[in-house]
Image (cartoon, rainbow, N blue to C red):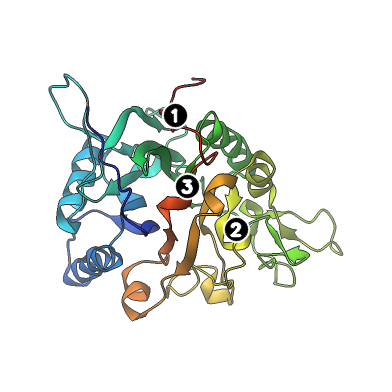
Amino acid sequence: MPTTDIREVTRMRFVTYNLLDLTLTADNLREANRQRRVIDTIRNLEPDVIAVQELKSPPASAARLAAELADRTGLTSTVATNGSARAIHAVAVGDHTVHTALLWRPGLTPLPHTFRTYSPAVHYHGGWRGIGYGSMVRLAFQIDGQPITFASYHAPAYGRHRRIDQAEAVLAALTRPHELALIGSDFNSIGAARANGADYDPDPYTGRPWWPDLVHQCHEPTHPSQRHRADRRPAQVWEAGGLHDVAAATRSPWKATTGHWPTCPYGVRGIARRVDTIHATQPVLRAVRSLTVVDNPTTRAASDHLPVTVDLDPRKLAVNPGEPARQAGQRGR
């Protein structure tokens, strides 16, 4: 199958964006206007590849919703497969009827053998359905002679230990054997990267009054005098395992991605958090030109999460300069 190589392009943009329960079938004018802003935002960002979270639909409709969003934004989600009688879309079904997907601009051709989805083990009849999301979709493209893998991930909103377990699974899926990989996430945890000798992400919880929801985010206090603090262990897994927080690694100015939404339970308590992240393997970092949290009146009115963009220079994506490119999936599983 032919692949599209963007060798002559000097900028490639990857975006991550939580769409706040996007259905594309709003039942009132206010919600219809909000969803229109989401679509306008994606169009205005002009992504080459975008990782989205919180497509909301019954599991059986997830692929159709991803395809419709792609169509409305001028992108595609279709993974071409040899001999397949039906279209395969880059979407992973999650808990709670919210899903993750990858969309990309026409002209980029995916490498179908790299396509994988990772969905939670959900018991749909009286089991664990709806307790906190947790899905990932992965796909590689041939870029400047090298396969580069992109992924979209939504970490569980509840279950700190579940987030740690998933962090390990995602790490394995992205870094073995993919030397060049980026993942856009609603990480639902505070980062663990260090910059200039300190935590890049300040602890947003220490010094704030305890309320029950913090049990999902903090090491809970075991006696009244103990200070609660953010549980950074999921992010520590990624940093130690070779998935690096691009914002911290490039010393980009810190900026919250949540807390602006009127009904956000953290925002109403004065807590602003950066939970929308782009992580990458070490060889990708040298190709990063910029990282931006897109904060403007439209993005603030479109979702409770702000989109994050990373611009790359594809010419700097060689794993080992001078060596011929390998095909994705050549080694390992």
User: x, y percentage for residue 149?
Assistant: 42, 39
**Alpha carbon of mark 2 to alpha carbon of mark 1: how far?**
46 Å
User: x, y percentage for residue 307?
Assistant: 40, 64
Front-most of 269 and 288? 288
Q: Is residue 222 left or right of residue 332?
A: right
Q: Residue at x 60, y 58 (%)?
A: 213
> On the image, numbered disc 2 is attached to which residue?
213
Q: In this view, does 197 lie to the left or right of 303?
A: right
Q: What residue type is labelled 1?
A: Arg
Front-most of 46 and 168? 46
Q: Is residue 166 above or below residue 222?
A: above
> On the image, numbered disc 3 is attached to which residue?
317
**Residue 163, picture quadrant:** top right
User: x, y percentage for residue 142?
Assistant: 34, 38
Numbered-mark total? 3
Q: Is mark 1 on a helix, strand or loop?
A: loop
Is tag 3's residue or tag 1's residue first in the polypeptide sequence?
Answer: 3
Instruction: Sort mark 1 into few (<14), some (14-19) or many (20+) by Cα contacts within 10 Å.
Output: few
Residue 281 can be seen, yes or no: no
Q: Is residue 225 above or below residue 147?
A: below
Instruction: Sort mark 3 into few (<14), some (14-19) or many (20+) by Cα contacts within 10 Å.
Output: many
Labels 3 and 1 touching (C-beta < 8 A): no
